[in-house]
Image (cartoon, helix red, strand yellow):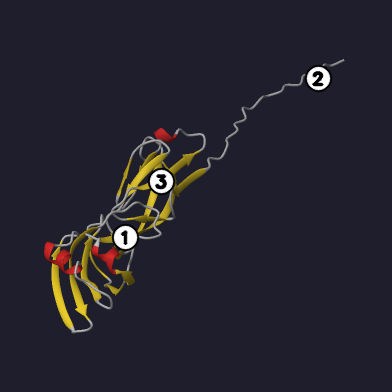
Amino acid sequence: MKKLLIVIILFPVYFSSAQNISISAEKNNVFYIGVDNPVSILVTNYPSVQVIVKTPKGEVHGSGRIRIYRGFEPGNTSIILYENDGLTEIGRSNFRVKYIPDPVAKVGPSGGGKINKTVLRNQQYLRAVLEDFDYNVGFTIDSFTTHIIRTDTCLIKEFINVGAKFSNSLGESLNTIKRNDIVIFKNIYAKGPDGRTLLLAPIVFAIID
């Protein structure tokens, strides 16, 4: 009886798990010029410290899972991930790059309207405030003009101020304001971290007791 020889040939089998790529802005889906924009980088099955991150517009700094993007002009850009050879792309994501929104001018707690004369007299600075924004952004007041109008005599006093702090002459005149006077802050120029000088909307106060 002939014996049947069965030969089993084993072929190697390779299993590969797909990489999941995640590139996301930590605070919103937009990058802003003049601030540090955190970017979260996650590549499964690949150490974050070995991922090289590049962008065609702007700069990317740092290492590990959180990188920092800094942009210089508005438009669109991409965050591109490479293996540590710097040549093999493993993922990318697109983002918008925008200027920081314009701030509003305030004196003390108020941005205009009726104000108690004592409250206004106690103020020393004009501020530029960015409201409802995710980043802590500071603005510098370059200059502004103040008009104090006496409604009973139609007398108008004008003061041109350099910097945010009220000049001595402006402070002295504010100490004499009374009920029904009108105080206008206008020609307000402020500079933000993105380097732009902005003309802010004027604010008008009606003085009450």
Left or right of 4? Residue 191 is left
Looking at the image, is 127 positioned above or below residue 13? Answer: below
Q: Quick one: 54 or 61, which is closer to the camera?
A: 61
Q: Quick one: 187 or 193, which is closer to the camera?
A: 187
SS assignment at label 2: loop
Residue position marked by numbered label 2 in the rendering: 4
Where the N terminus falls, by quadrant? top right
Residue drawn at (39%, 57%), measured in percent from left and top?
A: 133
Looking at the image, is 97 positioned above or below residue 160? Answer: above
**Discs 2/1, front:** 1
Q: Amino acid at mark 2?
A: Leu
Residue 98 in the image: state x and y as whole percent. Answer: 34, 60
Q: Quick one: 17 or 32, which is closer to the camera?
A: 32
Distance between the alpha carbons at the discs numbered 3 and 2:
65 Å
Disc assigned to residue 129: 1
Where the C terminus falls, by quadrant? bottom left
Q: Residues within 10 Å of mark 2 (few under 14, many from 20)?
A: few
Q: Is residue 112 visible?
A: no
Q: In the figure, residue 143 lies in which quadrant?
A: bottom left
Q: Amino acid at mark 1?
A: Val
Question: Mark 3 or mark 1, which is nearer the start of the sequence?
Answer: 3
Residue 140 in the image: state x and y as whole percent. Answer: 22, 57
Residue 84 in the image: state x and y as whole percent. Answer: 38, 35
Question: Mark 2 or mark 3, which is nearer the start of the sequence?
Answer: 2
Q: Amino acid at mark 3?
A: Val
Left or right of 50? Residue 18 is right
Q: Residues within 10 Å of mark 3 (few under 14, many from 20)?
A: many
Q: Do tag 3 and tag 2 residues touch (Cβ < 8 Å)?
A: no
Question: Mark 1 or mark 2, which is nearer the start of the sequence?
Answer: 2
